[in-house]
Image (spheres, rainbow, N blue to C red):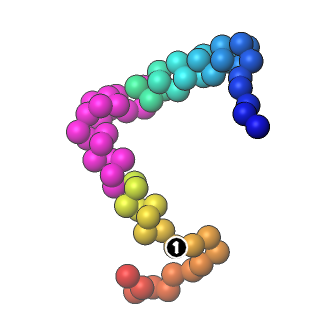
Amino acid sequence: MQLALTDRGVEVADQAMDVVRALNGELTSPLGGPDSAETRALGAALQTVLREAPEPGATRERGDD
């Protein structure tokens, strides 16, 4: 089975992507914009944090590193 967007669905998705791009530019502007080295460094740091995050429901004891 293959699904496809309706013409209206394509229109809504395009509008949503425009909104997300504008918001991304606005939120990353203090770092130099979406393509800046600072934004890439932030993305890399966040990926590291998420990769090292404990499993949901797990607790960490003080001193566990």
In the picture, the quarter occupied by the C terminus is: bottom left
Q: Is residue 19 visible?
A: no
Measured as percent of width and height from the top left, residue 43 is found at 36, 47
Judge left or right: residue 23 versus residue 36. right
Region in magenta = 26-45
Q: Quadrant of residue 59?
A: bottom right
* Residue 59 lies in the magenta-colored region: no
Residue under pointer 1: 54
Asked if the stretch drawn in magenta spans residue 41, the answer is: yes
Total numbered labels placed on residues in the image: 1
CA neighbours of label 1 inside 10 A, class few (<14), some (14 to 19), many (20+): few
Residue 37 in view here: yes
- Nearest the viewer among 3 and 10 is 3
20 over 51 or under it: above or below: above
Q: Circle 1 sits in a helix, a strand or a loop, which is it?
A: loop
Give me the residue at 42% from left, 25% from top: 26
Task: Look at the image and tell me in which quarter the N terminus lies.
Answer: top right
What secondary structure is the magenta-colored segment mainly? helix
- x and y percent of residue 20 in the render? 52, 26
Q: Is residue 14 left or right of residue 36?
A: right
**Residue type pointed to by label 1:** Pro
Point out the residue furthest to the left here. Answer: 37
Q: Is residue 44 left or right of residue 21?
A: left
* Side of 61 where 11 appears, left or right: right
Foreground pick, 29 / 47: 47
Q: Is residue 52 above or below residue 12?
A: below
**Considering depth in this image, is 8 or 40 the residue closer to the camera?**
8
- Residue drawn 71% across and 23% down? 5
In the rendered image, residue 63, in percent from the top left (x then y), is placed at 40, 86
Q: Tell me which residue sits at (71%, 13%) in the image.
A: 7
